[in-house]
Image: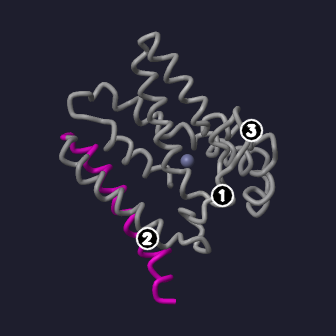
Amino acid sequence: MNTPSHVVVNLFLLGKEDSSKFYLPIIIGSLLPDIAIFWFYFWAKFIAKIPSSKIWSEVYFTDFWQNIFAVPNSIILCLIGVMICHYYGLTWLEIMLISMIIHCLFDLPVHHDDAHRHFVPLTNYRFISPFSYWDIRHHAKWIALIELLLVNISSFSLFNQFDTWWSRGLILFNLTVYIILYWRFYLPYFFS
Ligand SMILES: [Zn+2]
């Protein structure tokens, strides 16, 4: 899924009103699996100055970068982390790692040829899903619609839960962007 969806959905699933001190680890955990990919893009585009066409088709798939992406996307490594943190009573870190696992579980069914190795170091297996959250050749118009619905449901619940003007504004802004992007990029495929 798209990164902002993970933040909204994870907050909806894990963040209860009486546990506001855990909002931060939930948010960080929902971002971590994608952060290496953002760094990669920043490095490739602005530091290494690699042409955009090569970034996603070649460099992204090199072993070096794939190994870096695999670590925060590993359900196995996060599970081991959860057990260690649980044992030592490190609740904050435990919640962050659970949030990372939920991120991975939502990614697993919607990545086609960009699938992550979610079971490293046990196996390098990639689940090549018939569905993609972005690739129109793999049902993205439907998957993005489901993602939009999930973001909608989560956003309305979070809107009631959060009471500061800026958090509510951010939730509404994010939802509006999702609706506009869906309208612009995926809706036309229903009529073509
Ligand atoms: Zn992801």
Marks 3 and 1 sit apart, C-alpha to C-alpha, by 17 Å
Residue found at x 53% / y 28%: 79
Marks 1 and 2 sit apart, C-alpha to C-alpha, by 24 Å
Residue 110, given in percent of the width and then of the height, sits at 55, 58
According to the picture, the residue beneath numbered tag 2 turns out to be 182
Amino acid type of the residue that numbered disc 3 sits on in the rendered structure: Asn
The one nearer the camera, 22 or 47, is: 22
**Is 2 placed above or below 124 here?**
below
Crowd tier of the residue under label 1, counting other residues whose Cα lies within 10 Å: few below 14, some 14–19, many 20 or above? some
Residue 179: say if magenta: yes
Crowd tier of the residue under label 2, counting other residues whose Cα lies within 10 Å: few below 14, some 14–19, many 20 or above? some
Residue found at x 79% / y 51%: 59
Amino acid type of the residue that numbered disc 1 sits on in the rendered structure: Ile
Marks 2 and 3 sit apart, C-alpha to C-alpha, by 32 Å
Q: Earlier in the sequence, mark 1 or mark 2?
A: 1
Q: Earlier in the sequence, mark 3 or mark 1?
A: 3
Amino acid type of the residue that numbered disc 2 sits on in the rendered structure: Tyr
**Is 142 placed above or below 43 here?**
below
Residue found at x 49% / y 29%: 97
- The label nearer to you, 3 versus 1, is 1
Residue bounds of the magenta highlight: 163-192
SS type, badge 1: loop
According to the picture, the residue beneath numbered tag 3 turns out to be 67
Q: Earlier in the sequence, mark 2 or mark 3?
A: 3
Q: Which residue sits furthest top?
A: 88
According to the picture, the residue beneath numbered tag 1 turns out to be 128
Verify CB contact (< 8 Å) between mark 2 and mark 3. Answer: no
